[in-house]
Image (cartoon, grey):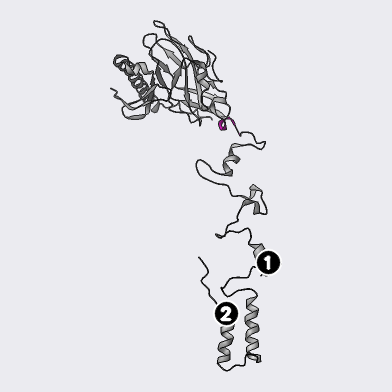
Amino acid sequence: MSNTIKQRPVEPILAELAAAGFNPLGSFCIAIRDLITRADKIANNNGEIQAKANVTGRTEQISTTLQNVDSAGNLSSLANVNTRTTDLLTDGTGSPLAGGKRGFVALDTNNRLANSFRANPVNVSNTPTSSTTLSNDGISTSIVISAYTSQFPPGSVSYNSGSIDPGSFTAEFVYFDDPTFAGGAVTFQFSPTASTQTAAEGRVPVGQITTVGGAAKTGGGSSGGTGGHAGGRGFIQG
Amino acid sequence: MHTTEVIHFSKLSNGQFCAVIRCCGNASTDWSHTMAAEVVADDIKRGSSIGIARQQCADLHEAAIKAESALINEVSAPPVEHP
């Protein structure tokens, strides 16, 4: 809000006193003038504090005191904070966390990721606790992914079962995306190309299976079963 | 008797299609079934593929119900009283 103070200048006041019969050079008018002049040292006719005034107990001019405070009363930049240690900042809250707290939670005292769940799944080793996770009956081309648990370094994550259907008996790499290690229901995908397993940061490989018409096969898991390579750990070689 | 329904069907970014099948309206039975585009495009292949996935979803639900009924009233042996 702008300043609405409009003080009367000294001269008209003294002129009124003279008109009222007071001697402008008399002691009364001089005393009045001295009082007004005393106030003029720190405030002008617009009711503004003079920039050269200083706050009681301080020696610098008020223009220096306020030079880094903007019109909204905020510091103009963090460079003007006297103590810049971030330890003084209050931790933020929310989900997901924001601000400095996000980094505090994600990093350890050596500035490394606090644990593997803070990394991208595609870079984190894991081992399925089941010996196989993929199966095909040799009759239909559908491949069943059993519900299974995978052991990651900070803990285990369980995934729901599901199925895929490539449409033919073939060799496929099965994977899904779970960027936050949430577990539970996931959307399984498949590809005959090994490199697809590492084509996204949140990707988790399930395993590989080669299906054959007329013969039941298993794959994935920690063993690879009868028709594939073991899943987990990292990418699966073709 | 189990009743399955496709509650969600979507095209994935890699061109495959995913159907989520639910049994008896129970969200805990949700079954993700991903198909190649050639399967979805062929009425017979699609019907067969979805049918198999429906049956797998129903079988899993049935197994869960049986397991629950077998385990829910299971009572452990009474503790041995020590003199």
Residue A66: horizontal and vertical position, in percent? 63, 62
Q: Chain of mark 1?
A: A
Residue A47: horizontal and vertical position, in percent? 57, 73
Cα separation between marks 2 and 1: 24 Å
Task: Name the residue at 55% across, 88% down.
Answer: A16
- Residue range corresponding to the magenta coloring: A114-118
User: Taking B77 as reference, is A238 above or below it?
Assistant: above
Q: Which residue is mark 1?
A: A61
**Mark 2 element type:** loop
Which amino acid is tagged 1?
Gln
Name the outermost residue toward the bottom: A21
Among the 4 quarters of the image, the one containing residue A140:
top left
Which numbered dot is residue A9?
A: 2
Q: Nearer the viewer, residue A114 or A123?
A: A123
Residue A195: horizontal and vertical position, in percent? 52, 18
Which numbered dot is residue A147?
A: none
Q: Is residue A219 visible?
A: no
Among the 4 quarters of the image, the one containing residue B56:
top left
User: Taking A57 as reference, is A76 above or below it?
Assistant: above
Which amino acid is tagged 2?
Pro
Q: Chain of mark 2?
A: A
Q: Give the foreground label among 2 and 1.
A: 2
Q: Residues within 10 Å of mark 2 (few under 14, many from 20)?
A: few
